[in-house]
Amino acid sequence: MRLHQNKVGGTHLLVGGVSLFTLLILGAMVFPTLPQTAQAEEAESKVSLSVAPVISLSLQDTVAVEVTPTQDGTFSSNTAALSISTNNETGYSLYMATSNSENTLTSQNPSISNVISAVNGGDNGVTSADFGNNTWGYNLSQETVSDATAYKAVPTATGDTAIISTSSPAEADNYNLTFGTKVDTSLPSGTYSNNVVVSVVANPAFVPVFDGIQTMQEMTSTICADAAENDTAQLTDTRDGKKYWVTKLADGNCWMTQNLDLDLSTSKALTPDDSDVSSNWTPTNSTLTDGTQTTTDYTAVWSWNLGDYVLTTPNAGTSCGTSGISDFGDCTGVGFQSIAGMAPMTDGNATDVISDNTYNAHYHVGNHYTWNAATAGTGGTITSTNATDSICPKGWQLPTSNISNSGSFQALTNAYSISSNTDGSTALVSAPLYFVRSGNVDSGSLRYAGNSGGYWSSTAYSSTSRAYRLSFDSGYVDPSYDLNRYFGQSVRCLAR
């Protein structure tokens, strides 16, 4: 703003103001470039048209504010019309700042050291009645200027926070950019000025990545594809409010990097809106809390929640449980620790299991499920194919596994060069994979906890009694090991 002075009569001072804008459109417009392609097949052509995003701003380049000072101070203002239009699907952001990183108006007469200071109104601003003498400020809104208009100090740097931000195209958004000042007779006559830069940038196209979603059910193939390897987030399962770490791993898939902990209930159906099911499915048995209750029915829908524990010795390989072990409370001697009263760590890349009174949820044991429970009842007696549904959250599914070395578990272990040896199992239980030696439930007991881990796939074995899983212990890793379907195994899901 440039305030200039006109003299009327001998000592009567008329201070006039002219605001000179150096208008700059700053920032890059971030958009994917849609290729213009033509493909021919059987005398047909497919034509894609890319419409480029454009943005325009119209603003008068001077604003004259004329003030006749009084001893107590006189307020005056003037308004410039500002108009913005864009076809950008995610709208625009407007920024404003002084060009010299100072928000004072200084005299163009080098012998005058007096300045007009920025108004002190904070985030809420001040109305004209509350202006201090020899201060100035701005207001930007679509409202007509009135006595209730609040003025703020012009920022000294563009910063990260937009003054205005929209989320959709605009044919013509019209604003009033008003500058106000209050001047008293203590201010020497002269011209006081500063340049203000207004910047309008097109918002980047919105592609949700891990930090743009909060729930497991919001995951999509596009979100996963756009994530970078090792991107990590903690997402909430809307079915019960439990949180899970998820990571984009080296095989190109997004995996849960902790065990599923969903309790099943005969009084609560899983639905296509929240789960990986094609229609509503209600479990025939609720989740049990005692590992001594087991089944030998190959089509049984059983599950076990044997306590909230983490394995503090993920690579120790010491076994707990051969008979009569009912829950993880019987296995504290091999490194299982209760997390009752603890809070989960917020660092998704933490390697400690317990620190102060926090725990690393990657090593949470989760629940155990029979294969027909894990496949939401669609496993049944199918053979040599994949179950269609699962108890994974919507947008997620069980991994696949088969002896042809082409399943999800095989791709994952191959991506990390994990082979069937001791070193391979060490890599499996370490970051960023974090598989847990949570044992299995069979024959009336929690068995081999602390030494072995088993994770169901969606793939049926050629026998109606068995299905494929990822299996490992301290001496081997097998991504295509078949097992009786009534065993209780852990579940990890990967994004569809």
Image (cartoon, helix red, strand yellow):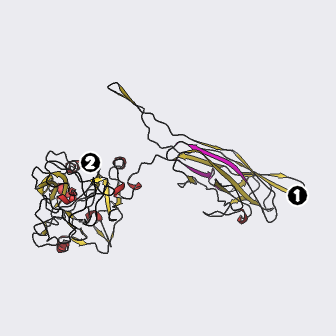
Question: How far apart are labels 2 and 1 at the CA level?
Answer: 81 Å
Q: Residue furthest top?
A: 43
Hey, what amino acid is under mark 1?
Answer: Thr
- Which residue position holds label 1? 11
Where residue 319 sits in the image (x, y, percent)? 13, 67
Q: Quadrant of residue 291?
A: bottom left
In the image, is residue 60 part of the stretch drawn in magenta?
no
Task: Report the front residue among 70 and 141.
Answer: 141
User: Which residue range is magenta in the image?
Assistant: 77-102
Q: Circle 2 sits on which residue?
A: 251
Q: Which image quadrant is residue 189 in?
A: bottom right
Crowding around mark 2 (Cα neighbors within 10 Å: few <14, some 14 to 19, many 20+) is some
| Residue 190 visible in the picture | no
Q: Is residue 334 above or below residue 269?
A: below
Q: For residue 156, what is the image quadrant?
A: bottom right
Tell me the number on the disc at residue 336. none
